[in-house]
Amino acid sequence: DSGVTQTPKHLITATGQRVTLRCSPRSGDLSVYWYQQSLDQGLQFLIQYYNGEERAKGNILERFSAQQFPDLHSELNLSSLELGDSALYFCASSVVGGQNSGNTIYFGEGSWLTVV
Amino acid sequence: GNSVTQMEGPVTLSEEAFLTINCTYTATGYPSLFWYVQYPGEGLQLLLKATKADDKGSNKGFEATYRKETTSFHLEKGSVQVSDSAVYFCALSPFSGGYNKLIFGAGTRLAVHP
């Protein structure tokens, strides 16, 4: 158990709909990351938040957005869903900035999204 | 830019065989290097890491050495088990400016048969 909690574990929804994926980081971790894993694209970095602020953006579509709340949990919002958005979405967290952080990023078990 | 290249799979081995999964990287500066493992139906787990040149990461019988001169971080295990069947991802973290992220290779599927 990495300590990163993601909900829901599985989600099936129709094209055009909107979903929200939720992530609770490990206790004490200030940084949250979102990754998408699909068969054709592999593991793609989407976005990173640090202590409530966006810090890095990867291959995140304009239809997708994320935020990190004061209690440090994060949500990834996916809208106008398309069949190609079907994927495993991972949240990860780390302690960033400390000398002993070791750069280790811990992953949750992922949220399986199926768009039909 | 930063990138990671892994050997293509699947890698199929018999139990107790020696395993090598090659990983090379391109990065500016001095990244940290990682191997993550994904067992069937599960999320990503950190397997081992190395944060500077010549460091050796090890865990569960797996080892990888950070080779700056060859920009490599090959994963090895002396005797694989059926339970090692999984997808293995090599990754680097540039850790630039205190805000790090992981850049992954494509993953290598390992299948170990009894």
Image (cartoon, coloured by chain):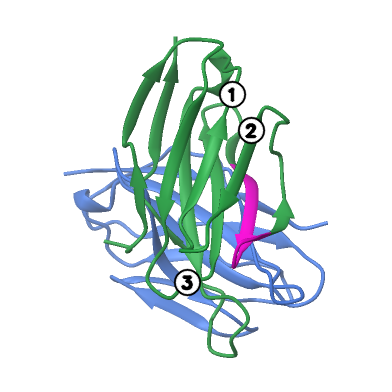
Residue A52, picture quadrant? bottom right
In the rendered structure, which amino acid carries the disc numbered 3?
Asp
Tell me if B67 is positioned left or right of A3 in this view: right
Q: Quick one: SS at disc 3?
A: loop
* Magenta region includes residue A50: yes
The residue wearing badge 1 is A79
Q: Quick one: SS at disc 2?
A: strand
Chain with colour blue in the figure: B
In the rendered structure, which amino acid carries the disc numbered 2?
Phe
- Crowding at dot 3, Cα within 10 Å, few <14 / some 14-19 / many 20+, comes out as many
The residue range painted magenta reads A44-53
Marks 1,2: beta carbons within 8 A: yes
Image x and y of residue A66, in percent: 60, 44
Tell me if A91 is positioned left or right of B97 in this view: left
Q: Which comes sooner in the sequence, label 3 or label 1?
A: 3
Residue B42, picture quadrant? top left
